[in-house]
Amino acid sequence: MIIKKFKASTEEAAMLMAKEELGPDAVVMNIKKIKRKGIMKLFKKNTVELTAAIDDNVAEKAEPEKYDEEAQNAIEEKINSIAKLLEQQLNAVKDKDEEDNTDTSDDLYETEKKDDRADTAFRDKFNDTKDNQSKGYKNKVVELIYNQLNESEVKKEIIEDIIGELDTENSRLPLDNMLANVYQKLVLKLGEVKPLKVSDEKPKIVFFVGNTGVGKTTTMAKLASKFKLENKLNIAMLSIDTYRIAAIDQIKTYADILNTPMEVVYNPEDIKKYVEKYKDCDLIFVDTAGHSHRNEEQKKNLKEMVDSVSEYETEVFLVVSAVVKYNDLLDIAKTYDKLFDYKIIFTKLDETSTVGAILNLKIDMDKSLAYTTWGQNVPDDIGEVNPQIIAKSLLGGASDGSGV
């Protein structure tokens, strides 16, 4: 990640400098007004310091491109919708404080005093409470954002890293500015999405690994259908899941519908034989057996299968369920990380109301996100991860449960 600071007389000028140097994909991390001190403040104007960042990979391949007004408006709409949601929550707290006030006088002076007391109680509720989930941030908006991310099950250390700067500088920044800042940081931390790409060299072998019951077979079928039907590619499917007859029958059914070859693999020699047989295919999808990540023998067998075709271009997707407890998710991800590199697919987003695990696992494992799935419909219920929608959902915005 490239992070740079830009100083200018106005916020707009600093923003322009950042975009000119880092490109249109630059993300604003923080904006700080610098006041002149001492006698020099009489002769010089205050300045603005803007901190911007961009991913290294994006910076390397960035090219001048036209301003996408439609995309920018879409992002602003999302931010505004979340801002309205948070404002409603703020007003709800304030209204409750007013209802709890026992002063029922109709006198205008008394009513104004009651409103002042409600405002004071509202501020105190966020400033001084020790029962709050957060660390007691002085700024009530920051406090609310903290609690919202906490409710989304984002790890506390990640939340503190994201909003840390908001409480120390410019604490009276408007809600939409603060929210936009946090939103941009979330998008940046989710990183560049890396879905499956077709290689010029044939065949590319794609493994789907993960624990039992996470939806590997269905996920593989969804991607096979998309690449077959939408991209008109030649595909073959292999199954290493000899533990479940139902899994083999399921893949055979999909293969028949797509009119693609399907083979059952029992050992490393088999997989090498079938890869050679279908070497003219663009993609060879391999469904692996689901098992406990603590089973050393099964892990060894899986690694042997992947290593047996190392002379070809391979790609591994770790399929994990969004409804699994995060500590278990992290344990699973670390186990597979010892076997091979991989990208992450999150399944069953329709079965959970929080998506904090997506951000947590991305940061903790430093692995690229690829796809999310929701539902059993093939090939419809799958899509590439959309960091903007994930960020919106983390901040309490409405989501359709897909994450794309």
Image (tube, rainbow, N blue to C red):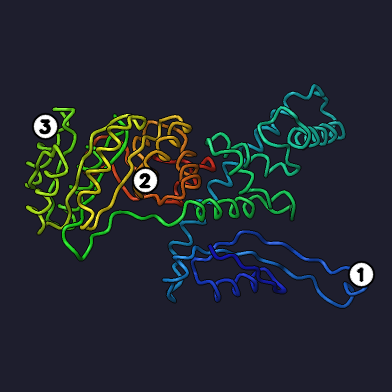
Q: Nearer the viewer, residue 206 or 16?
A: 206
Q: CA distance from mark 1 to mark 3?
A: 79 Å
Q: Residues within 10 Å of mark 2 (few under 14, many from 20)?
A: many
The residue that mark 2 highlights is 344
Q: Which mark is residue 399?
A: none
Residue lying at 85% horizontally and 34% vertically, measured from the top left? 113
Residue lying at 74% horizontally and 23% vertically, measured from the top left? 100
Q: CA distance from mark 2 to mark 1?
A: 54 Å
Q: Nearer the viewer, residue 92 or 274?
A: 274
Q: Nearer the viewer, residue 364 or 355?
A: 364
Badge 1 amino acid: Gly
Q: Residues within 10 Å of mark 3 (few under 14, many from 20)?
A: few
Badge 2 amino acid: Ile
> Residue 41, located in which quarter of the rendered image?
bottom right
In the image, is 320 to the left or to the right of 124?
Answer: left
Q: Residues within 10 Å of mark 1 (few under 14, many from 20)?
A: few
In the image, is 97 to the left or to the right of 72?
Answer: right
The residue that mark 3 highlights is 249
Q: Nearer the viewer, mark 2 or mark 1?
A: 2
Of callouts 3 and 2, which one flags the residue occurring earlier in the amino acid sequence?
Answer: 3
Badge 3 amino acid: Asp
- Picture coordinates of residue 178, whole percent (x, y): 64, 52
> Residue 238, located in which quarter of the rendered image?
top left
- Picture coordinates of residue 358, whole percent (x, y): 45, 42
Whether 157 is drawn above or below 34: the answer is above
Q: Nearer the viewer, mark 1 or mark 3?
A: 3
Q: Nearer the viewer, residue 336 or 396?
A: 336
Residue lying at 66% horizontally and 37% vertically, measured from the top left? 91
Q: SS of the residue at dot 1? A: helix
The residue that mark 1 highlights is 38
